[in-house]
Amino acid sequence: MTQAQKGICAEPNLHALFLTFNVIDDDAPTMRKKIAQVLALFSHYDEEYYEAMVSGIVAIGTDYWYELYPRSIPQELSPFPRMSCDDRNAPASPGDLFIQIKADRMDICHAIGTEVIQLLQPNVDLYEEVKGFRYLDGRDLTGFVDGTENPKGMHKFNVALVGDQDPDFAGGSYIHIQRYRHSMEKWKQLSVSAQEETFGRTKTNNVEFKGVDKAPFSHTKRTSLKDEQGNSIEMLRQSMPYGDMTIQGLYFVSCAKSPLPFAKMLKSMIFGDENGVYDKLLDFTSAETGGAFFAPSINFIKQQANE
């Protein structure tokens, strides 16, 4: 039976370490083996420190995939859908490998990250590392609960994982990442009611506004999309806040059985509706990175490592 990577549909954790690498040589057989060894590291720490609820994701950048696994390509593999309209941008940034490490102990995230980097050297350069953390009761640093629209229960597996539509890659997931930087001082100048109008739900008790009460520019309006049959266009988010006393933001991670939901959401946010009404939250936060990856099943990674 195909086994998905644990981190794709894992429950929220207290801490995260997001690592993006660029591969600097063309030794694909070695990298295939090393990627399988990263999975073994996750399993080791999960067993050794079971109370920390360790989980991880290893995902391969869409450009690098053709070098790493040239004989087997996911059906919908595609580059990051970079977009720009006025001062709203979704840039693409370098990234051949994306590794997400989550646990309820920051020291465990650090220990795993250290071993991952030791394992992957000298084949890679670390492009970026970001430490994520749970903020209060699962809120973004804007003060609003994050991930409210995430699918629940077994449904999240149907949303996040490739199924019978691409049987060779069943259990895999299309991963998109963006590091958003918030303009916190600008955000704090808004009244609570204006902040709530921007999000489309209440701040304190996280009650979503009724559809007729939502402004067309609200974040929930622009990101809660439906297809032509009226079905919700869904993805599973694994996002977490990051920052220090100077810089704050959200590290966005989405997992889906297709790259299309992310691209449609991004287009709705940046370009807006037929009247050009965009997501007003983008007046207060901006994406500084962007990457598209595919996280294959554990079975696929191990099989390719042995060939």
Image (cartoon, helix red, strand yellow):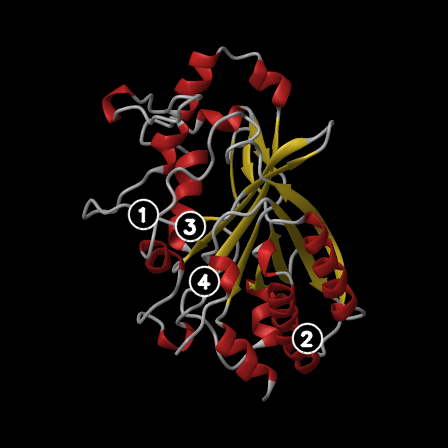
Q: Residue 220 appears at what percent x and percent y?
A: 37, 31
Q: Quadrant of residue 287?
A: top right
Residue that carries the numbered disc 4 in the rendered image: 173
Residue that carries the numbered disc 3 in the rendered image: 236
Label 4 – label 1 distance at C-alpha: 16 Å
Q: Are marks 4 and 1 in contact (CB under 8 Å)?
A: no
Label 3 – label 4 distance at C-alpha: 10 Å
**Residue at the image position 51 percent from the left and 29 percent from the top:** 282
Q: Earlier in the sequence, mark 2 or mark 3?
A: 2
Q: Residue 192 appears at what percent x and percent y?
A: 47, 13
| Residue, far front | 51
Question: Foreground mark, 1 or 2?
Answer: 2
Label 2 – label 3 distance at C-alpha: 27 Å
User: Please, what is the three-letter code of the amino acid marked with disc 2?
Assistant: Lys
Q: Residue 244 appears at what percent x and percent y?
A: 72, 32
| Residue, far right | 122
- Residue neighbourhood size for the residue with mark 4, other residues' Cα within 10 Å, grouped as few (<14), some (14–19), many (≥20): many
User: Please, what is the three-letter code of the amino acid marked with disc 4?
Assistant: Ser
199 relative to 126 in the view: left or right: left
198 relative to 32 in the view: left or right: left
Residue that carries the numbered disc 1 in the rendered image: 233
Label 1 – label 2 distance at C-alpha: 35 Å
Residue that carries the numbered disc 2 in the rendered image: 34
Residue 192 can be seen, yes or no: yes
Label 3 – label 1 distance at C-alpha: 11 Å
- Residue neighbourhood size for the residue with mark 1, other residues' Cα within 10 Å, grouped as few (<14), some (14–19), many (≥20): some
Q: Earlier in the sequence, mark 1 or mark 2?
A: 2
User: Please, what is the three-letter code of the amino acid marked with disc 3?
Assistant: Leu
**Residue at the image position 35 percent from the left and 48 percent from the top:** 151
Viewer-closest of 167 and 79:
167
Q: Residue 50 appears at what percent x and percent y?
A: 59, 61
